[in-house]
Amino acid sequence: MTHTNVKIGKTDVETTPLGLGTNAVGGYNLFPNLKDEDGLNLVTAGLNHGIRLLDTAFVYGLGHSEELVGQAMHNFDRHSFALATKGAQDFSTGEQVINNDPAFLTQQVDASLQRLNTDYLDIYYIHFPDKQTPKAEAVGALQRLREQGKIRAIGVSNFSLAQVKAANADGYVDVVEDEFSLLHRDHEADLMPYLRDHQISFVPYFPLASGLLTGKYDQDVTFPADDIRSQISDFQEPRYGQALKAIAKVKPIAAAHQATVAQTILAWYMQNPLISVVIPGAKRAAQVTANAQALDVTLSASDYQTIDAAFAAFKVTANGKSLADPD
Ligand code: NAP
């Protein structure tokens, strides 16, 4: 393994810079036709192949992802890996409402601990910001849970930079999880440098752009109407063609490292100084096993720059759009 472990924020939570996203482990409300057995095998494969951060959430299968992750991880020493989960979705009225109320978050942490069958969480994220709760009060509730030993690091997810600043008023925020990939570079100019300057870790989600950045698609891909990818702009022109052109430039670098495109792109994230842990998801154990090998891929400075430049069209310019977006 050539990539060294990282610490989360100012805490002593330690993990490999490659984690495992588990929204397809029991996430029946997000993906059709998932099998519990595949989910259990995914998590087992990740831990067997050296991945040391599992990223789940209550909303993935409304508790089912947490139950399956909890089941799979019990074959491993609990102190040998880090466990992250998230909450904020309140279904008490029958429909989903985002709720950051301190009492609700406190209750949610206890419910997650129970489903995961563990007595501490290495990271707990407020999954989405609500409109009404002052963010420092929401984080204050998590700080009290940290003092009780129930959580070790405090995270927020899908917060704007202004909301992160408000949440971190007392300096308690350790980690932010938000969308970022070589195709979605919006946070590169403001949020990510702010986090680095404040010793807050950044964990990007959708790093493989729902599989597009694995290099497995070619010019003629179509998805059925009920597949979410049929609506994602990355799979539509002009972004799709630009993405394929950029991926073509990664292929010779991958070949030189005897690596796949996915492993090469995951290595790029691990070498990005603004990124702490990259958490690709997977549907099958074989994908996890393959992705874990990215821990052995080290890019030269010139490879790193070539990949960065290949995706330059996806950087966001001063008008808030990227060159890959339609006019
Ligand atoms: P992703 O990592 O961009 O893409 C993962 C998908 O790519 C897999 O499900 C698989 O789909 C394909 N894939 C992965 N490895 C592959 C390989 N080696 N070869 C070929 N295909 C491969 O997207 P994601 O899983 O949706 O997101 C990552 C994680 O981020 C999630 O699991 C979740 O934990 C987290 N997340 C968090 C939030 C938040 O609000 N905080 C939101 C979204 C996601 P196919 O096999 O179907 O192609």
Image (spheres, helix red, strand yellow):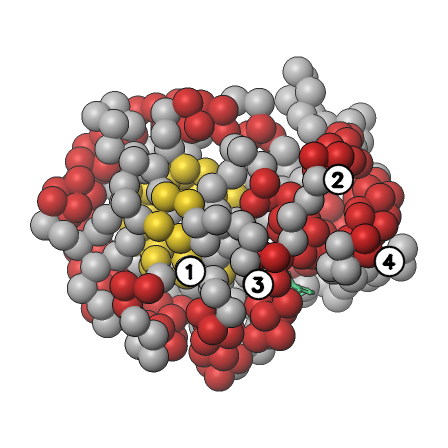
Q: Residue 318, percent across and down?
A: 66, 16
Crowdedness near tag 2: few (<14), some (14–19) or many (≥20) residues, C-alpha within 10 Å:
some
Residue at the limit of the structure toward the top, as seen here:
318
Q: Residue 234, percent across and down?
A: 73, 46
Report the amino acid beneath label 3.
Ala
Of badges 4 and 1, the one in the foreground is: 1
Q: Are marks 4 and 1 in contact (CB under 8 Å)?
A: no
Residue that carries the numbered disc 4 in the rendered image: 218
Residue at the limit of the structure toward the right, as seen here:
219
Q: Which mark is residue 52?
A: 1
Q: Residue at x 20, y 43 (%)?
A: 142
Figure quadrant of the C terminus = top right
Q: What's the CA distance linking mark 2 and mark 4?
A: 23 Å
Crowdedness near tag 3: few (<14), some (14–19) or many (≥20) residues, C-alpha within 10 Å:
many
Q: Residue at x 85, y 50 (%)?
A: 252
Residue that carries the numbered disc 2 in the rendered image: 303
Report the amino acid beneath label 2.
Asp
Report the amino acid beneath label 4.
Asp
Instruction: Report whether residue 150 is seen.
Output: yes
Q: Residue at x 10, y 50 (%)?
A: 148
Helix, strand or loop for disc 1: loop
Beta carbon at label 1 within 8 Å of ligand 1: no
Q: What's the CA distance linking mark 1 and mark 3?
A: 10 Å
Earlier sequence position, callout 4 versus callout 3: 4
Q: Ligand 1 is found in which quarter of the picture?
A: bottom right
Crowdedness near tag 1: few (<14), some (14–19) or many (≥20) residues, C-alpha within 10 Å:
many
Q: Which mark is residue 292?
A: 3
Q: Residue at x 24, y 33 (%)?
A: 172
Earlier sequence position, callout 2 versus callout 3: 3
